[in-house]
Image: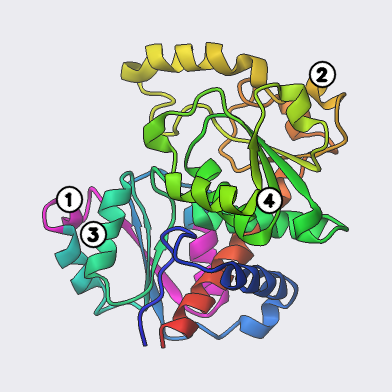
Amino acid sequence: MAIRHLISWQDWSDSEIRELLDFAIYVKKHRVYFAGHMHGRTMAMLFQKTSTRTRVSFEAGMTELGGHAIFLDWIASNFLLSDIDFEAAYLSTNVSVIMARLKKHEDLLILKKGSSVPLINGCCNLYHPCQSLADILTIALDSPKKIEENRLTYIGVHNNVANSLVEITAALGMHLTLTTPIAQKESISEQAIARAKSKNTVTWEPDIKKAIKDADYIYTDTWVDMEFFNDPNFAKAKEERIQTMMPYQINADLLKHTGAKVMHDMPIHAGFEITREVVESGRSIIFSQAENRLDAQKAIILELLEKSE
């Protein structure tokens, strides 16, 4: 049987994505059923990028499933010194699954080439599929509507999170409105956009009040990549980006125009893309969204291993 990976949603059919979402819901509601499923198995977690939720949710997930997770810092490992596919080939002989959080999508594809076990994209510059599954899981658990009846508005920089939201909403038939004043060509997945256009599930709306008018959920993300936020060499570009994006902040005044709930994938830079008042308000489901990373990761691990055996 071929090895199944999760690099993006590109290689997953609509029905496969829906089945994974349904499975994640089941895992969430029946955690005790899966307590020993990873007994005697190990996950390697390879990190180039900083992380809180990705590391904690995958490591805690493996522990709760009865397995073990090994943290590998890219800089402290020989991935920094050797060919990536060679190191991946070795790693595959010791673990059952690899999760990698890398800066470049191209490096992830090389890692995949060398891996003989399932590889999970824990975030790269182009995609964040694990986050998007947790996002949709959150909506599915929160909303009384069928998932495809909900309307989601993403407001912010077009980035890896936006690409994965475009992909997963297209697969599920859920409408996504994008308000993305900064949308650099190198950050946009044309394949994701093509899929969504073919399903007529994505629209672009530059007017923020029009964008949220019919939304059930409003989603925002950091305006500056986490590795650059406190980098003095990026200070000028950061300031320019903030000036461009401040009119698109999620705040109490904006929420007067909508009944939508608010989402954010974290880490949050309060006072920039969203105010602390909104994060702590009754309209926010941000912390439930973050909690759902745990069950989404579990579902992904279990699904990939089942389909690769």
Q: Amino acid at mark 1?
A: Leu
Residue topped by disc 4: 289
Whether residue 292 appears in this view of the structure is yes
Q: Residue at x 61, y 60 (%)?
A: 171
Position of residue 137 in the picture relative to residue 51 (left or right) = right
**Distance of label 1 from label 3 (alpha carbons):** 14 Å
- Circle 3 sits in a helix, a strand or a loop, which is it? helix
Residue drawn at (57%, 74%) of the image: 64
Residue under label 3: 110
Residue 76 percent coordinates (x, y): 22, 51
**Residue 133 location in percent, x, y?**
60, 58
Give the secondary structure at mark 2. Answer: helix
Q: Residues within 10 Å of mark 2 (few under 14, many from 20)?
A: few
Image position, residue 85 (x, y; %): 18, 64
Separation of disc 2 and disc 3 at Cα?
46 Å
On the image, numbered disc 2 is attached to which residue? 253
Local SS, label 4: helix
Query: Which contiguous range is marked in magenta?
Result: 56-83
233 shown above or below 153: above
Viewer-nearest of labels 3 and 4?
3
Specify which label sits upstream in the sequence, 1 or 3.
1
